[in-house]
Image (cartoon, grey):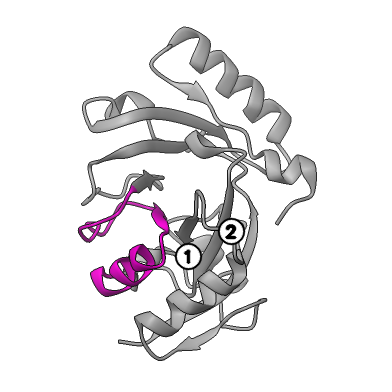
């Protein structure tokens, strides 16, 4: 199959359990919870998304004919360093496109393969790191992984709902936007009173990283 990619770039992971680690981000185009068009935001399941995942016009983006072609583009972005290779497949919703063929092609190039998903689609076999970030009250098809990262607060979404799931880490991340300061204080307060949860900050935004 071919792959529609918005952008590919090398940066530091800014949030979650692997924050601070060098990684190539592969942002797939498209999402199943929002069209990406501002005129549709009010009706979207996830109406607070701040990511541009529409089209294939970002740095390194494009239509890749097969898994080998995309894996080569990701490897080229990383460069010659052979150690600690990490690619983070994100979106939009990466599991609309990420498949076992691409995972195998990336493993063949010595990459650990991580995914950041909304959890509405079950993950393919072979992933090394699964981060699920639930949106609104949508049912989850992926209920296990390395981390569950919940943007907080979300109206009508109780973090306790997710605690029975099989994740190694439970992270709360303050909702960005005009109320970020208040949301951060609310997130800190929740983590202090519910120590199962850890605070996740989007450090890349503070540092000016992509």
Label 1 crowd bin: few (<14), some (14–19), many (20+), radius 10 Å: many
Instruction: Answer left or right for 105 relative to 144.
Output: right
Instruction: Answer left or right for 60 relative to 96.
Output: right
| Residue closest to the eye, 9 or 182 | 9
Q: Is residue 36 visible?
A: no
Residue lying at 22% horizontally and 42% vertically, measured from the top left: 143
The residue labelled by disc 2 is 81
Query: How far from the left and from the top, in percent, is residue 166?
Result: 22, 32
Of all residues shown, which one is farthest toward the top? Answer: 193
Q: Nearer the viewer, mark 1 or mark 2?
A: 2
Chain part drawn in magenta: 99-128
Tag 1 near tag 2, CB within 8 Å: no
Quadrant assignment, res 67? bottom left
**Distance from Cα at disc 1 to Cα at disc 2:** 28 Å
Above or below 54: residue 202: above
* Residue 41 covered by magenta stretch: no
Instruction: Answer left or right for 123 relative to 4.
Output: left
Query: How far from the left and from the top, in percent, is residue 74?
Result: 52, 71
Label 2 crowd bin: few (<14), some (14–19), many (20+), radius 10 Å: few
The circle drawn on residue 112 is none
Of all residues shown, which one is farthest toward the bottom? Answer: 65
Q: Earlier in the sequence, mark 1 or mark 2?
A: 2
Query: How far from the left and from the top, in percent, is residue 69?
Result: 44, 84
Query: How far from the left and from the top, in percent, is residue 53?
Result: 55, 70
Above or below 99: residue 142: above
Quadrant for the N terminus in the image: bottom left
The circle drawn on residue 92 is 1
* Residue 119 covered by magenta stretch: yes
SS class, disc 2: loop
Above or below 11: residue 7: below
């Amino acid at each position: 199959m071919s792959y529609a990619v918005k952008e590919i770039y090398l940066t530091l992971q800014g949030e979650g359990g692997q924050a601070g680690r060098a990684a190539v981000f592969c942002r797939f185009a498209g999402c199943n919870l929002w069209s990406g068009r501002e005129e549709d935001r009010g009706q979207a399941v996830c109406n607070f998304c701040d990511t541009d995942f529409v089209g294939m016009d970002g740095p390194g983006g494009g239509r890749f004919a097969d898994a080998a072609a995309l894996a080569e583009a990701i490897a080229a972005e990383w460069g010659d360093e052979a150690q600690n290779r990490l690619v983070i497949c994100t979106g939009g919703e990466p599991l609309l496109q990420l498949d076992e063929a691409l995972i195998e092609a990336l493993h063949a190039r010595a990459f650990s393969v991580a995914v950041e998903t909304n959890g509405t689609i079950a993950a393919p076999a072979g992933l090394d790191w699964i981060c699920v970030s639930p949106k609104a009250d949508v049912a989850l098809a992926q209920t296990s992984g390395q981390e569950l990262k919940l943007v907080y607060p979300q109206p009508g979404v109780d973090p306790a709902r997710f605690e029975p799931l099989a994740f190694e880490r439970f992270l709360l991340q303050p909702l960005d936007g005009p109320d970020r300061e208040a949301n951060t204080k609310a997130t800190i307060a929740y983590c202090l009173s519910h120590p199962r949860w850890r605070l996740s900050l989007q450090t890349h935004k503070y540092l000016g990283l992509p």
